[in-house]
Amino acid sequence: MYRSIILFVLLCSKAVAHEMTPTYPKWGITYIEGVKKATMKMVNKREDVEWYEIDVFDDKWKPIPFVTKSKIFKIKYLGHKKFDVYINAKDSERTEYLCSTSKLIGDGSTKPMLETRICSRFK
């Protein structure tokens, strides 16, 4: 019974999140020796969220050091942002995921909040 209700709610609810492309990015070269770069684009499809954080992980979900202009940035509803992620060439070989996570700001209300994480995967 409960399984049917949960399935019904999931099928009938509107799933809203943010998008990050490309889905399968590739590291490109930069003018700095030993540094690689990936260019990404995000679109915010959530009215209730404007802040997002970027992270890079290996295949065991351990963080990998990286540099970007801002690790946390603001995107208005239906807005988009293009950004570059820079990484040490040696670390790029073990990089598996580049993720963005919505950052929620508490307003003291009791309504539930949903944090979303979208990941692109390096081949």
Image (spheres, rainbow, N blue to C red):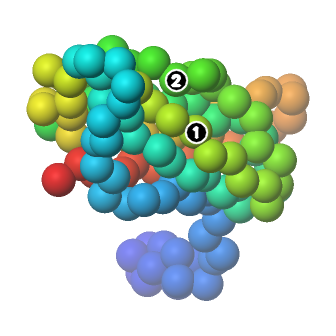
Are dots 2 and 1 in contact, CB under 8 Å? yes
Q: Residue at x 62, y 22 (%)?
A: 70
Instruction: Classify residue 9 as left or right of residue 29.
Output: right
Whole-percent x, y for residue 10 in the image = 52, 75
Element marked by disc 1: strand
Please state the horizontal and vertical placement of residue 74, each as a whole percent of the image. 76, 35
Question: Tag 2's secondary structure?
Answer: strand
Q: Relative to residue 89, is residue 79 drawn left or right?
A: right
Residue at 28 percent across and 49 percent down: it is: 26
Specify the quadrant of the image occupied by residue 110. top right
For residue 14, above or below residue 58: below
Is 113 situated above or below 105?
below
Q: Which mark is residue 68?
A: 2
Residue, disc 1: 83
Residue flagged by tag 1: what amino acid is it?
A: Phe
Q: Work out whether residue 15 can be spotted.
A: yes
Q: Disc 2 residue type?
A: Thr
Q: Is residue 109 above or below residue 44?
A: above
Q: Which of the two labelled residues, at mark 2 and mark 1, occupies the earlier sequence position?
A: 2
Numbered badge on residue 107: none
